Image (cartoon, rainbow, N blue to C red):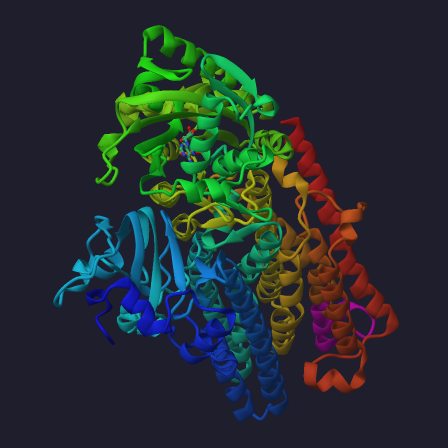
Amino acid sequence: MKNYYQFSAEEVKQDINGKQEPLTAAEVKAHQEKFGPNELVEGKKKTTLQIFLEQYKDFLVIILIAAAIVSGFLGDAESAIVILIVITINAILGTVQTVKAEQSLASLKKLSGPEAKVLRDGSVVPIPSAEVTVGDIVMLDAGDYIPADGRLLESASLKVDESALTGESLGVEKMTDAIEGEVPLGDRTNMVYSGSFVTYGRGSFVVTGIGMETEVGKIASLLKTTSEKKTPLQVNLDQFGQKLSIIILVFCGILFGINVFRGGNIGDAFLFAVALAVAAIPEALSSIVTIVLSFGTQKMAKEHAIIRKLQAVEGLGSVSIICSDKTGTLTQNKMTVEQYYVNETVIPADKIDVKDSEQEKLMYFSILCNDSTNVDGVEIGDPTETALINLGSKLGLDIQKIRGEYPRESENPFDSDRKLMSTKHTIDETPIMVVKGAVDVIMGRTASIQCGDEVRAITPEDIEKIEAQNQSFSREGLRVLGFAYKAVSAEEELSLEDENNLTFLGLIAMMDPPREESMAAVAECKRAGIRPIMITGDHKVTAAAIAKRIGILEDESEACEGAVIDSMSDEELKNFVEGISVYARVSPEHKIRIVRAWQEKGNIVAMTGDGVNDAPALKQADIGVAMGITGSEVSKDAASMVLTDDNFATIVKAVENGRNVYQNIKNSIQFLLSGNFGAILAVLYASIAGLPVPFAPVHLLFINLLTDSLPAIALGLEPHSKKVMDEKPRPMNESILTKDFLTKIGTEGLCIGITTMIGFMIGLTGEGGNAVLASTMAFGTLCTARLVHGFNCKSDYPVIFSKRFWNNIYLIGAFLLGLVLITCVMTIPALDEVFKVQTLTFTQLLIVYGLALVNLPIIQLMKKIKLMFRKNK
Ligand code: ATP
């Protein structure tokens, strides 16, 4: 490959595209076909067959295979075959679940994939980075990821963080001049490289390499592909599962010893111990979590919240503080100019007179010192800036013509730390720097003022008047920009030092109404024990006015400026944050300190961000939330959740989803563990009482591997309930297995165990009773009771007489399927041998159904009583 940095931008374009103009649509297509997608080839994905085979790696499955082999040797071919069939079905179920979960995660990744802005057919369009091709011209702004390697065509104070490639974390200043001789990558200042990002300024480049042909592609094989980390809940459950497994294995070992000691057949005793272990060990816990989480994320994506890290779903349920930007998140980000202020006069937007020299100047400056465009109604750029050009168009000005007449010669791009932007143009043969920005910043840099056609030194009275006007606009919730200018040198590029000794021209005030749904979302937050906090770069009075309107703030004293916290120690800040609901004029560093202070007070904090400088705060927050529409690519990359509608209400909805997903996972676990516990209790009772073994191994395998998995998953997909928002946030470090939860599992397991044993005793001692009949009835009761128990696990509240009882069609489906299966086993004589059962009479079948069903009213009543106690407390 050529050393493109040694050539001029024109030569590079000529070499790659054979012309200077951007590629046409047909050429783009041809290049895409020739060069392929702009993607790094990841490590090989597992095939479905590999996933299927992996199901057999499970410790329990290996034991089961051993058990099948032992059965075969002992001459019990039927048991061996049944075990193998059951394991295979289980493996198929496991494969389907894993593949589905992976697919849903992959589609999620696609949704939040990076984008790039390219010049196509004469206009700038956003496209997925994967579609960028060689020869494309890519536009860059602060916060953009560089999608491919390329030669710069234009650089307006462009600075790029290339630390991913060079390890150098300081932004590298970029320019466009050709470089002589060979230089290392870090010194090729006219090139940009895929994987780095823009920290400051603006620019454009022509793509010279994509995908594996980029510098980062060449080292991609060295980069470790990051595998999905387990979520805290999964880790917590894995640990619990391991401990429980050891206890159960010891217990099964003892039971095996007792059975052999009593003179039982060693083979049978072994099979039974294995089956009991399989029945009792909740091996599906962690995979249930994955499935439910991945389904939950799909629902959230439909509701405009894309989860980038699975951990975030759990975390969302614990969020107790939401720090939100104002502009665009709580407000509509649809700015319209309402008032002008020039020469001590307020002029409503519809009364602006472009023939008045001062008003005309303000209007022209607001069009020139502006990066936004509006082509045929398609607005590109910051809404603050589009508002300015929209007003110009409305008043009959030709924006393109004005910009063509006074082209931009140099610029200091906008940056939210400095809160200023300036551009240089030659007006009436004088090189002029136009500056716009936050009023307080502009006023701090102003030395003179324009009054009519005259310019004179600014007086304290002038400043007082301007500030009073700024306050008055702000109290109405208006966003105010100040405009100033000065003559500068014709030759030199603008520098930040130039932004001093300015001449004040006027103010422009614009309205950004709150989003309609913000008020309800804020109220819901408060009901759910979550504190909403506004953090904005805007003026304190404007921010407080809007915050009051949507209910975030009650009293002005709850608002402060970011600078106030500069002098505070971290300890002081910790006490201070409690009383503040609105932070104005904040810099990105303040955001990090505020998040940290709340975290140190034991809170789980969600924080929104959009700019490149917000990335550290987004990483610091427990749930970093990026804006899908207005957010920079860097902020999206740092976030764990991306809002596709930039809306505060979506965060609150996501919290509700997070709480519901957590609750559903908890319900599935409760279902699995209480059922398993019921089975263990029945076996334990029988062995202590010296009764025959209540279940044949195949019974336990049937229940655990077939009829139980579907209701457990169905419970995870339970429709969401609004009730979760009536509760306080769940403490993050609270283990899912609280005392209360374990007590519930214990009592419900006890009910199932008792009814199972009653079935067993009726089969053993009733008319025509025998050990096989007893075992059949115990098996039938346990299996059906567990299916019925699915409905108990829908909610902590009694649901038996409510519509909610019927609202989960997956659960009803799983129940009916399970019921048909178990009924077939109990009533079809041909299956007797295979399943070690005795065909039941109609009365016996009714007894089994009746016993299983009894669990419903009893457990529902227990919920009701518990609820009454909780209310009385
Ligand atoms: P939020 O932080 O809630 O998104 P914001 O948009 O006001 O609010 P910033 O983008 O950091 O926050 O802007 C900070 C301040 O800089 C604004 O209040 C405004 O005074 C000024 N400002 C915003 N946009 C521009 C711009 N394009 N050019 C010049 N000044 C601007």
The front one of 861 and 541 is 541
Picture layout, residue 630 above or below residue 26: above
Q: Is residue 682 left or right of residue 861?
A: left
Q: Which residue, as the protein is rendered here, is positioned at the far left?
A: 181
Q: Is residue 765 left or right of residue 332?
A: right
Q: Position of residue 151 (x, y in %)?
A: 29, 63
The front one of 364 and 95 is 364
753 drawn magenta: no
Picture layout, residue 831 above or below residue 516: below
Magenta span: 760-779
- In the rendered picture of this protein, how many numbered marks are placed on residues? 0
Q: Position of residue 478 (x, y in %)?
A: 53, 23
Question: Which residue is located at x 74 percent, y 48 percent?
Answer: 858
Question: Which residue is located at x 50 percent, y 21 percent?
Answer: 356
- Image quadrant where residue 90 sits: bottom right
Q: Position of residue 165 (x, y in %)?
A: 24, 61
Q: Is residue 764 left or right of residue 589?
A: right
Ligand 1 sits in which quadrant?
A: top left
Is residue 755 visible in the rendered structure shown here? yes
